[in-house]
Image (cartoon, rainbow, N blue to C red):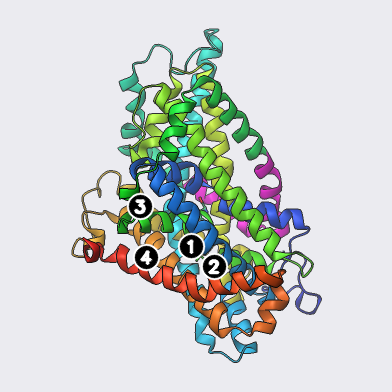
Amino acid sequence: MVAGGDPGVAGSATAQEHWSSRFAFVMAAVGSAVGLGNLWRFPAEAGQNGGGAFVIFYIACVALIGLPLLLSETLIGRHGKSSAVESVRVVARESGGSTAWSALAVVGAIASFLIVSFYSVIAGWVLYYIGVFAGDLFASIGSGNLTGGAFAGQSAEQVQGLMPALFDNNAVMLPLHALFMGLTIYVVARGVTGGIEKVAVYLMPAFFILFLGITVYGAFSGDFAEALAFMFAFDPARLLHGPVMLSALGQAFFSLSLGSAIMITYGAYADRGVNLAKTSGMIAACDTSVAIIAGLCIFPIVFAAGLAVDSGPTLMFQTLPASFQTMPAGSLIGLLFFVMVFFAALTSSVSLLDAPTNWIRYKFGWTRARTAVLVGGLAFVIGIFSALSFNVMGEWYPLDFIAMFREQNFFGVVDGFTGKIMLPLSGLLTAIFIGWVADRRLTDAENGISGGLHLFWRFLVAWLCPIALTVILILGIFPELIG
Ligand code: PHE
């Protein structure tokens, strides 16, 4: 069951697994990073936060905070060669620090667990739209109208009505949530070489081909100029605004899968020969390009249809399908678009489930399969409440008494708490741990950089990350501090 374990403990439930190649590691890590965060959340957040200012702050967060932390996390994993929590303990012990630092990975693993609970609900909507566009494609083939817009003969209101109808229909939403979670559990249960890297190695290249194809299509047949202007229009008044800054930071963490124990876990499957600095740079570059290009892929189509891009979470599921109505070969491209989103979502959800699964299986010595079923099953149950937040529980605000969560339903609270508090908090602890506690000889031997770049990395991890993360966390949680 456990593939490629250490010879000494092979056969035991917790033998440490390994990627079968560097390519597999990179694809799996990029697969974790690139997901609904890039395709659904980033364009929605950029659209709602006024475009340019958000985008610029986002890029700064990725380069100055995200990338150094990404290297720190993969480094902890590769040195510890165990679950994320155990790996932190190993590094702490060897550095003469307290093993209580492993709390940073506990926070991360719990965040992953909570995120996968609602991630699967949203991925279920993706499955629904795959079905809708597939049905429409068959209809358009039947009527010989393959090159025309999607949903021929239906009004724009009818197409926009698909999403509210889905949100009201638990009989569709919950089975799709179950289906997606089931798929995720299956892949994680099959292990690193048998499951996680298999989906990454096949689905990520397929994702990139579809993504580039659809972007080129959008650039030629949509309103590319308006999208460019919107994404990079810079309004300095919005830049130093606590909530916008916290959103950009939260988005950077979410998108890079940081602070979630995932990159520690994935780093632990990597071999000594892999250059972690290069790999981290590649992951961050791919992830950021996909987020920005996703904006340049979705906005032109939406602008061309004359619709607004500030619709937030409904952008991909309501505005975009309606936009495909007016686009050439709309049903086919719409179908390919949602298949592509599904590929990205699955490689991310697998990483989200793997981090807590790995932690629990090391802790209790259980098999991977059993742990994945238990952890994924529990996440499924919690996810039901997120799904119900879109209908019957929509107006139940569990933490209404906290300013940050005012008028946020269950889904809003879990999303906000994980993205804006747990991930940055785990990142903050990681920065302090690597910057101040971990033995320098140990980190220097692992990180794969030297000279000025190395000093710069140390400066970012030890100084900039802790200070910036603390300030942004405080401003985000207490926006009244700067009015
Ligand atoms: N990074 C993934 C995305 O952008 C999802 C994710 C979030 C994974 C948080 C891990 C942690 O969709």
Residue, disc 4:
472
Residue 58 in percent (x, y) is at 46, 53
Compared with residue 273, is residue 147 higher up or lower down, i.e. above or below? above
Is 194 covered by the magenta stretch? Answer: yes
Asked whether 33 or 366 is in front, the reply is: 33
Are the two marked residues, 1 and 2, in contact with CB atoms closer than 8 angstroms? yes
Residue, disc 3:
239
Which numbered circle lies on residue 261? 2
Of the two numbered discs 4 and 3 in the rendering, the one whose residue sits closer to the viewer: 3
Of the two numbered discs 4 and 2 in the rendering, the one whose residue sits closer to the viewer: 4
> Magenta part of the protein: which range?
178-205
CA gap, disc 4 to disc 2? 21 Å
- Magenta span: predominant SS is helix
Among numbered discs 4 and 1, the one appearing first in the sequence: 1
Among numbered discs 2 and 3, the one appearing first in the sequence: 3
- Secondary element under disc 2, as helix, strand or loop, is loop
Residue 311 in percent (x, y) is at 33, 37
Q: Is mark 1 within 8 Å of ligand 1?
A: yes
Q: Amino acid at mark 1?
A: Ser
CA gap, disc 4 to disc 3? 13 Å
Compared with residue 357, is residue 434 higher up or lower down, i.e. above or below? below
Q: Amino acid at mark 3?
A: Leu
